[in-house]
Amino acid sequence: MYALFKSNPTWTQFNMSFKFRCRALIFGLAVLSLSAGCNEQPHSTALEPPVDQALTVTTYHGKVKGRWTQTNEPIRVFQGVPYARPPVDQLRWRPPQAPQSWSGVLPTLTPGSACWQAAPVDNFVWSRGSFERSEDCLYLNIWGQPSAIDQAVMVWFHGGSHTTGRSHEAIFNGAELARQGVIVVTVNYRLGPLGFLAHPLLNAESSHNSSGNYGLLDKIAALNWIRDNIAQFGGNPGNMTIFGQSAGSQSVCALMASPLAKGLFAKAIGQSAACMRPLDELDPNGHNTGEALIASLTTAKQADTLRQISPQQLINAAQTTQWAGQSRIVVDGWVLPDEPQQIYALKQQAKVPLLLGSLANEGHNLFPLDTQLTETQLREFASYIAGPDLAEPLLALYASQANTSPGLAQREIITDRFMAHGMRRWADHQTDTGQPVYLYFMDHTPPAFALYRPADPELNLPKGPRSAGAYHSGDLAYVFGNTQKVGLHWQPQDHAMAALITQYWTNFAKTGDPNGPGLPNWPTYNKENRNTQLLRPNPETRSGVRREILDLWDQYAL
C-alpha cells in the first residue's frame, strides 16, 4: 500500500526500535495483502454454442475466439487477450506499447501468464501455490452475454500490494456479474520492481523525465484498449466503471488523480484502500528505494544494463532491500504530477460517481499484533501517530471498547486510520466535486478460506471458519457473486447477500446509483449525514460508522 507515517532512515531492522515496529505494522500490508492462486481452468462441460460466430469477435488488432462458461445461460469468456506488447527486453520499464496485429483467429481460451512476482507464499487467506510467471503478462479477460448490446462495462484491478496477484483467479470469475447485464473485464498489470521501479537512469531515457508507475500505465493502456474494442463484445465504451480491492482500490484512487486517465471511465468503485496519505514523505519519486535496490545488484550506469538483470534477481533484491516497505506508486511528474491527496484537495480528480467502503476487521491477520505491547508503549505510539494533542482523546475512545489490550488497541487504531478513515476522506473529497458518493461498511463475518487456492481452500482455524471477523478481502466472493463457486462453509444468508451486493455493484455500474427495485435503499453520502450502508444479510443505513473516532482523526488530517 502506501506510507502512513513519516519515514525514518535509521529504522533498518524490525526490532531495533519501537518506532520501527510502528512503521512495520503499517507497511505490513505490503507483504500481507496478497492476491494470487491457482489458474482458473476451462470448464469441461461448456455449453455448445448455438452458432460458432457468437464466439468470434473482431478487435482492432485481429479476430479472437472465446469459449462458453458453465452457467445456466450462455455467458462467453475470452481469456488471455493481449492489450499491449510483451514488456520484455527493451520494453522493460517503458510505457506499454500497443499490441501487434495478427492474421487469422487468435484462440483466447485460457488465461495469459501471471506477471512476475514472488511465489509461493503461505499467509492466511492470501496463501497461494506455485504457478507460471512471466514478464509477458499484459493480458485481460472478458465475460459477457453474446446478445449484449451497449451494456455497461466493469473493469477489475486485483489487489496484492502491487507486488502479487493475477486477474484470472477463480474468485474473479466474471460470469455471475455478466448475468446481471454487464460486460466484465479483469486486467493483469506489471507488479513489484518490474511494475513500479523508479530510478534516475530510467528518468534520463524517458521523454517525460519519468520512471515508476508502469503498473498504472498498464491499467491506462488496458482502459484505452477497452475503449477502442469493447463495443465489439457488446459493451458501451462511454459507460465504463473501474473497480478494485486493496492495491486495486488504491489504483482506482490514483487513476482518478491521473491526467492520463481522464475521460477513460465514467464511474469508480474502491474496496478497502485509498490514496489519501502521502505516498512517501522522504522519497516521493521513489528514487532512493529504487537506487538502493539496483545498487544491491550492480554498479552499472546504463539503463540497458539494468534490463539484463533477471526477474527473480529483482524480486530477491526487493525483499532484501525492503523496497516494498515504501509506496510502489510514486509521484513521477507524468502519471501522477503531485501527491494524490493534493490533487483531490484541489478538486482536480475525475468528476465521476464513486462507491467505496471497507470491512469491520480489516486488520485481523493483516497487520501484526504485538502481544507484548505495554500501556506506556501504546501511549508513545498514539502520540506518534496522532500527535500529542490528540493522543489522550484517541486512547480514551479506544479504551471504551471492552476487553481491549494495548496490542489490540494499537492494531485497531492502525486499521481505522488506514482503512475506515482513508475511505471516508476519499468520500469527502469526492463529494466536494458535487458527484454522488455511496459509502459502505461490511460488518458481516464471512467464512475464512484460502481465497486463491480453489482446489485446497480449507484453513482449519482453531476457533472455526468465522473466527477471523470481516477480514481484508472477505468481500471478494460476494462482489463477484461467486459464493457458489469458491470457498467452504457458506450458508444460505451468504448466497443471498452475494446476490444483493452484485445487484448493488452492477446497478451502480449501469446508472451511477446502486439502488434498484426490491433492494434496501442506499442513500448518498455527504459530510453532514455521513450515510453509510452496512453490508450484512439485512442491510441498513447508519449515520456514520465509528463516527466519533473518525471525526477525531479528521482533526489530525486537517
Image: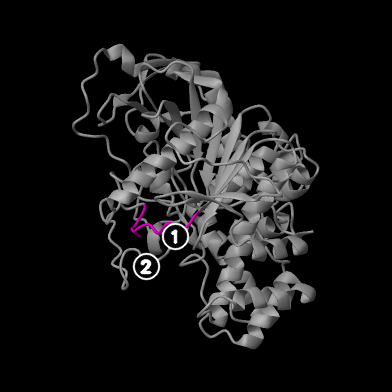
Q: Which residues are magenta?
A: 442-451
Choose top left, top right, bottom left or bottom right for residue 22. Answer: bottom right
Residue at 36% x, 53% y is 451
- Residue flagged by tag 1: what amino acid is it? Ala
Q: Quadrant of the N terminus?
A: bottom right
Q: Is residue 85 visible?
A: no
- In the rendered image, residue 116, in percent from the top left (x then y), is placed at 47, 48
For label 2, the SS is loop
Q: Of 455 and 316, which appears nearest the observer?
A: 455
Q: Of 90 and 174, which appears nearest the observer?
A: 174
For label 1, the SS is loop
Q: Of 531 and 511, which appears nearest the observer?
A: 531
Choose top left, top right, bottom left or bottom right for residue 121. Answer: bottom left
Q: Are marks 2 and 1 in contact (CB under 8 Å)?
A: no
Residue at numbered disc 1: 470
Residue at numbered disc 2: 467
- In the rendered image, residue 70, in percent from the top left (x then y), is placed at 25, 31
- In the rendered image, residue 403, in percent from the top left (x then y), is placed at 50, 80
Residue at 43% x, 19% y is 233
Q: Of 140 and 353, which appears nearest the observer?
A: 353
Q: Is residue 445 magenta?
A: yes
- Residue flagged by tag 2: what amino acid is it? Ser
Residue at 72% x, 54% y is 287
Query: In the displayed structure, would residue 147 be above or below residue 287?
Result: above
Query: In the displayed structure, would residue 54 be above or below residue 448?
Result: above
Indicate which disc residue 268 carries: none
Going by the image, does 447 lie left or right of 334?
A: left
Q: Quadrant of the C terminus?
A: bottom right
Main SS, magenta residues: loop
Q: Is residue 180 magenta?
A: no
